[in-house]
Image: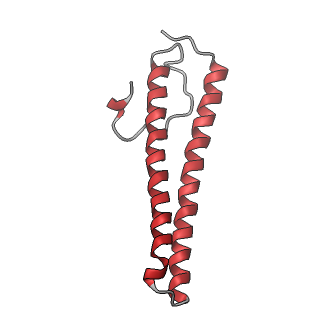
Amino acid sequence: MHIVKVTSARKLAADIHRAHAAVDQALIEITRLTTDMLEIACESHIAAAEGQKALEAVTEGISTFVAGRSRIVRAHRQMAGIKGRSNLEVIDMGCLPGPLTTGNLAAVG
């Protein structure tokens, strides 16, 4: 059994929540950027071919952030699994409700 300090675990839990929020906010901003690019191109009568490379670059950025988000969720699940095998097993660190309440919890470990 791992022995983890409650204060350290609470700091880590806060870090995890901030990381989730930061990635989600970045996705929101990139999505807004994409929408604005398309709206400006339409209202300015910019040919689709002219803006295509920029649009592809931005959407690749979205895909990269979505993949990163998946990895953060996976890391969170792994950390929750470690917590479950520690002295903090029954201590609430703020994960409920949260990203670990849905999805395949069998991945914890």
80, above or below 99, in the image: above
Q: Nearer the viewer, residue 52 or 5?
A: 52
Residue 90 x/y as whole percent: 50, 20
Looking at the image, residue 37 sits to the left or right of residue 71; the answer is right
Q: How many labels sit on residues?
A: 0
Q: Residue at x 42, y 38 (%)?
A: 101
74, above or below 37, in the image: above
Residue 50 x/y as whole percent: 48, 81
Q: Residue at x 39, y 41 (%)?
A: 102
Residue 54 x/y as whole percent: 51, 71
Residue 76 x/y as whole percent: 49, 33
Q: Nearer the viewer, residue 40 or 103?
A: 40
Q: Give the image's coloring scheme.
A: secondary structure
Q: Quadrant of the C terminus?
A: top left
54, above or below 41, in the image: above
Q: Residue at x 36, y 33 (%)?
A: 105
Q: Residue at x 54, y 52 (%)?
A: 24
18, above or below 54, in the image: above
Q: Nearer the viewer, residue 62 or 56?
A: 56
